[in-house]
Image (cartoon, rainbow, N blue to C red):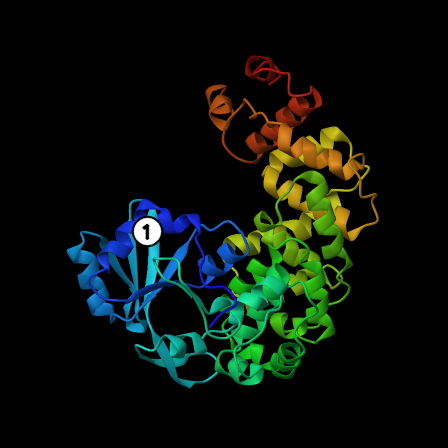
């Protein structure tokens, strides 16, 4: 069955886990934990979320949880998934399934009580590991050895598995970025390359989710470069991508400045297309990935503000821009200019000082408002706006030291 017979992760001893397994004790051998929690425990990685599989049908699962006074949510009951909420922990519990038909985007499934059939429909061998509440490990396809050696391998024929859901192409590269230690599995890589054009069938939302998860992985550059070499990346965006050097520099800059790449997904997207005409590339990317209005705003703010943020920018102008933009977007624009230029990759670089300024300087609020001018008998309109702008410039020139009273005295 497996080169490893048992596993004893700490989450098996969580009170919440014990409560869940106790609820299913009336159904003999009906519950096993599966997927990421088992895989990451095997690799001694931190586990936050635990999923389970069961031979119980969804209605049975709901009834079993209710009898144990556990909150049960029918989060995906049509596909066999019920979420158990115990304290602050949530467990997704899915009935064992087998594929009946697939069209590359969706699969028609039927419930089964065969654990191996359920394992066979999963994507990679390292994701088809099951652990009983007692810590007995079930590995039907060599996932233990693959996980430990860093080989991301499809279960069965890679081409057939990809044709069931073309999103698996992106999942392959994401898993390779996170878990791969060896050169990519040759069969998997060839199948991904052959089916790359089919990524265009997928919804932008699904592609976006996978892509942003990939970009958040440390040293994702190597995987993006692999995707580009295999002619996959162009199908993700719907247009050819140029030099990925800016993304490579961005990862180094994030490390230098203590930034987290998973917090800068939009910045990473911009760095990827930085070698192209920027407004047009961003517009096409927004459409292809179905980005939210908020994310689109971030991208276009970076595009339009980058010309203002050069390495020789005086500190007073930096502060002025920080007041006009939120610190996060100012930092994005600084990091993009740094990544797309030839600035030194060091803490002493002017761009590094700008990032530190954005993190430490708390922009003051302009102390004069339109109400103050109304009280001084200034009529609303263009003249009031010009007057406020003049006072604000004088306030900035004073190093933000002029008080409200001193400014109003200048009317």
Q: Name the residue under label 1.
A: 17
Q: In this view, does 12 lie above or below 364?
A: below
The image position of residue 28, as x and y in percent, is 24, 66
**Residue closer to the observer: 305 or 5:** 5
Q: Can residue 285 be seen in this view?
A: no
**Residue closer to the observer: 232 or 277:** 232
Q: In this view, does 303 lie above or below 97?
A: above
The image position of residue 321, as x and y in percent, is 66, 36
Image quarter where the C terminus lies is: top right
Q: In this view, does 377 lie above or below 58?
A: above
**Residue closer to the observer: 106 or 67:** 67
Which residue is depicted at the point 28% across and 67% down?
Answer: 30
Which residue is depicted at the point 81% across and 50% down?
Answer: 341
Which residue is depicted at the point 57% across and 47% down?
Answer: 263
The image position of residue 202, as x and y in percent, is 51, 75
Q: Can residue 154 be seen in this view?
A: yes
Please tell me whether mark 1 sits on a helix, a strand or a loop. Answer: helix
């Amino acid at each position: 069955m497996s080169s490893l017979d048992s596993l004893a992760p700490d989450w098996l001893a969580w009170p919440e886990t014990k409560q869940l397994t106790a609820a299913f004790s009336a159904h003999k051998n009906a519950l096993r934990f599966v997927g990421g929690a088992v895989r990451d425990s095997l690799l001694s990685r931190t586990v936050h979320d635990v999923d389970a599989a069961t031979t119980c049908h969804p209605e049975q699962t709901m009834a079993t949880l209710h009898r144990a006074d556990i909150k049960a949510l029918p989060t995906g009951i049509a596909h066999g998934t019920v979420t158990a909420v115990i304290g602050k922990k949530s467990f997704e519990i899915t009935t064992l399934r087998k594929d009946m038909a697939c069209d590359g985007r969706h699969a028609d499934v039927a419930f089964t009580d065969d654990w191996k059939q359920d394992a066979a429909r999963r994507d990679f061998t390292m994701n088809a590991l099951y652990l009983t509440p007692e810590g007995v490990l079930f590995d039907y396809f060599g996932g233990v050895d693959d996980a430990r050696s860093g080989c991301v391998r499809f279960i069965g024929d890679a081409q057939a598995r990809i044709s069931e859901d073309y999103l698996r192409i992106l999942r392959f590269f994401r898993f390779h970025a996170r878990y791969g230690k060896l050169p990519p599995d040759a069969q998997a890589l060839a199948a991904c390359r052959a089916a790359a054009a089919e990524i265009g069938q997928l919804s932008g939302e699904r592609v976006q989710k996978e892509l942003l998860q990939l970009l958040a992985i440390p040293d994702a550059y190597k995987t993006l470069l692999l995707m580009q070499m295999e002619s996959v990346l162009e199908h993700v965006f719907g247009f050819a991508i140029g030099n990925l050097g800016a993304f490579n520099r961005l990862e180094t800059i994030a490390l230098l400045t203590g930034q987290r790449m998973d917090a800068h997904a939009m910045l990473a997207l911009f760095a990827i297309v930085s070698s192209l005409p920027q407004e047009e590339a961003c517009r096409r990317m927004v459409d292809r990935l179905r980005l939210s209005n908020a994310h689109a705003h971030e991208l276009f703010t970076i595009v339009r503000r980058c010309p203002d943020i050069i390495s020789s920018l005086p500190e007073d102008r930096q502060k002025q821009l920080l007041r006009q933009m939120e610190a996060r977007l100012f930092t994005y624009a600084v990091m993009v200019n740094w990544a797309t230029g030839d600035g030194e990759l060091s803490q002493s670089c002017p761009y590094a000082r700008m990032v530190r300024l954005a993190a430490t300087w708390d922009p003051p609020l302009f102390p004069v408002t339109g109400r103050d001018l109304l009280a001084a008998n200034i009529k609303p309109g263009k003249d009031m706006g010009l007057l406020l702008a003049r006072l604000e410039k004088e306030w900035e020139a004073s190093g933000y030291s002029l008080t409200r009273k001193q400014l109003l005295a200048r009317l």
